[in-house]
Image (cartoon, helix red, strand yellow):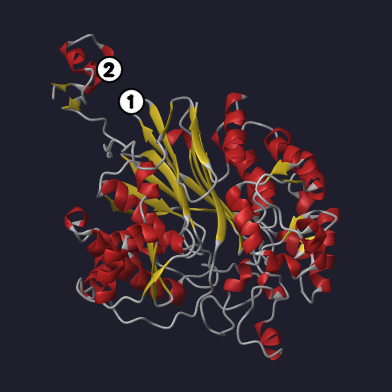
Amino acid sequence: MLRCHYRKAIRTNSACETGVARYIVCTVDPPAKVFSRMRNFITPSRSIAVGERGMAATSHPQATLAALEILKAGGNAMDAAIAAVALQGVVEPQMTGVGGDCFVIYSPKAGTPVALNGSGRTPAKTDIAATMAKGAKDLTPTSIEGITIPGAIDAWCRLAAAHGSKSLEEIFQPAINAAENGFRITPRVAADWTRNRARLESNPATAEQYLPGGVAPQVGDKRSQPALGRTLRRIAREGRAAFYEGEVAEELVSVLRGLGGVHALEDFAANAPEDVTPISTTYGGHDVLECPPNGQGLAALMILRTLAGYDIKALSEADRVHLLAEATKAAYRARDAFFCDPVHGKVDASHFLSENYIGAIRSKIDMARATASVDWDDIEHKDTVYVTVVDRELNAVSFINSLFQPFGSGVYAPKSGVLLHNRGWGFRLKPGHPNALAPGKRPMHTIIPGMVMKDGRCVMPFGVMGGHYQATGHANFLSNVFDLGMDIQAASEAPRSFAFDGVLSLEPTLGSGIGAELAARGHDVKWADAAIGGCQAIWIDHAQGVLFGASDHRKDGAALGL
């Protein structure tokens, strides 16, 4: 193999050209280039996407294309990301929509990032005592108290005004077109729709829209959402007031009150997203940024801090799965005990990331034996979409939007076409608990966007879907990249595991031998019957001027570059 300087190798007709059929080993790699594995073109997988004038990665192909069309039309990364998310609320209604919440990290021109908390609050008249007086010990997925004020539209409008370059009319057009003129059902959407039809059957108006004739759509079927299209047109013209005031808000309040809710027009009008400062830790020589609580990004950083105390590359695959499981259990115990709306309870990230706290976690990990399971009293969190876009100016967006469970609460407002989430299901009916149900309060959220920085510049916006799994998924994905040297596509596709509710779930691709070894260490091993999460990421190679994109096989989506 020949050795040459990186820049000369690509710019000059030097002696390096004699090795054109071989890999070129550079004495000076691009500073941000940390992965180097060539894909095995025999093993089924996807190639990493490559571009230089823009890149989008989403969990739905139409959303990726919509983002690219916005970029090609002169829009920036924020324009494209909002367009993609809005469209996904139409074509992936089980995952996300205008009736949900979002979190965003944004790095302008790969510089200092900012973050936005777009999660909504409970109504002002929420009363935990009144709820408990009904005999409830816990909220259910369809409890009216589980429907908080949706924060997504307010956040989208704020982000477009602050960081976008195009009008809402242009940004929403792909979503409006799909809602009014129809869209085709993709495989993962069809599977989710069929699997979760019970939620749709729980409400007559919802069933009429999403199960016409009692039938869930199959792959290739065409569906539309005309009422939602009209609402999106109104928001595009009038901004956030078209959702939080007037006819849409009035219908939502009427529907919710008809089901026993205490929601009021004042609750909708008062909704506001919050600018927040990202929290971070260092891993693999890079700074990893997350949104602070009420999201679970802090748990992802805790897991990374725990892993940083080990030589991951030297461990066997079974060792790595075991270590990730033990780090997850420790971080999630802290999450479920302390993470909450910071207005209602201070969460000191520096304490949970301190060497004393993390060192105590490491000291209790036995690589030969699983720790005893503890009772899990949190709620199962599932469905989300994640979008990332980088434009030619290297503005980078990490954007996550969710209805919480599949099809959210199942409560549908037929005139406005809004399907409401059930994010508040995560509240506890335990007075005094940091995440106890209370008025004007945000629940602990599982949805988390991520961003990786190097030398003060963004090098990778990324996200992992999958509810509870997201914090674990962030840590596992980054370890695959920084510890194992995988490119971001391979890192997103690697077999997954998740320690949850006393069980260690393994994707079958890990193999029976790994399962047996982990069971021998005391884990309650279960083989996953569905894919664990999903992932999108974009790597910015500043030295080479190249964008690399990834979208894993567990969803219908794609990463594409310009």
CA gap, disc 1 to disc 2? Answer: 9 Å
Q: Which mark is residue 544?
A: 1
Neighbor class of circle 1 (other Cα within 10 Å; few <14, some 14-19, many 20+) is some
Residue 437, compared with residue 328, is above or below; it is: below
Of the residues shown, which amino acid type is indicated by label 1?
A: Gln
Of the residues shown, which amino acid type is indicated by label 2?
A: Ile
Q: In the rendered image, which quarter contains the N terminus?
A: top left
The percent coordinates of residue 304 (x first, y second) are 31, 59
Whether pointer 1 and pointer 2 mark residues with C-beta atoms closer than 8 Å, the reply is yes
Residue 552 in the figure: left or right of residue 306? right
* Frontmost residue, 153 versus 15: 15
The percent coordinates of residue 321 (x first, y second) are 29, 63
Q: Which residue is mark 2?
A: 10
* Frontmost residue, 220 versus 180: 220
At x 38%, y 61%, the residue is 508
Instruction: Using the rendered image of the protein, determine whether residue 297 is visible from the camera's viewpoint.
Output: no
Neighbor class of circle 2 (other Cα within 10 Å; few <14, some 14-19, many 20+) is few
